[in-house]
Amino acid sequence: MKSAMKPLTLLLAAAGLLHGGAAKAELKAGDKAPDFTAQAAVGGKEFTFSLAEALKRGPVVLYFYPKSFTPGCTAEAHEFAEAAESFSAAGASLIGVSADRIDTQKEFSAKECRDRFPVAADPDLKVIRAYDAVMVRVPGITGVADRTSYVVAPDGTILYSYTALSPDKHVQNTLAVVREWRKAHP
């Protein structure tokens, strides 16, 4: 399996070099977030995630990532896992989404998300396309999500969007937005 992941990892790294930094996601602040349900896993256990249900409890940080168990996606999952309590303290929930199948997501949720937040499977790219998060930068790479993070308000509108292949700022940026939202909505 490692040999099959190496070419994708190299292409994703090349995409980061070609991209050269952050770009804006297609869905913007103020846009209506597409509602969805998807098979997801947390702590290795499968369940059906519903955005509408999650929004009843507060804002949702919805982040798309290219491929489970690749270096950047693993680093990002670790960072979100470390910040999961901070998001929860601000009243937000987290969900990661990739084109990986549910069996992969079960393993990824337990190992790399450290049982702290769920990841959803979107192998047909239905949710990824609805959020305009399909990676299109590198010829030959199809069927994976770009690294795009959204913060969705409880009313279903997008508060924030950020696209950058580097995982470095996704947690920091989304947590800042959630904390600002919380200040305005005590």
Image: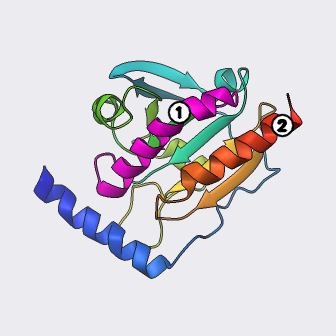
Q: Give the range drawn in magenta.
A: 68-92
Magenta stretch, main secondary structure, is: helix
Residue 93 visible, this angle: no
Whether residue 175 is situated above or below residue 92 in the rendered picture: below
Residue placed most toward the observer, 82 or 50: 82
**In the shown orientation, is residue 123 left or right of residue 172?**
left
Does residue 44 appear anywhere in the picture? Answer: yes
Residue carrying label 1: 84
Query: Which residue is found at the position 46% from the left and 38% from the top?
Result: 82
Residue 157, relative to residue 143: is it above or below? Answer: above
Residue highlighted by disc 2: 183
Q: Magenta stretch: residue 91 in it?
A: yes
Q: Which badge, 2 or 1, comes first in the chain's sequence?
A: 1
Instruction: Locate residue 112, reporting x and y percent.
Output: 33, 38
- In depth, the one of 143 and 184 nearer the eye is 184
Q: How crowded is mark 2: few (under 14 residues within 10 Å), some or many (20 or more)?
A: few
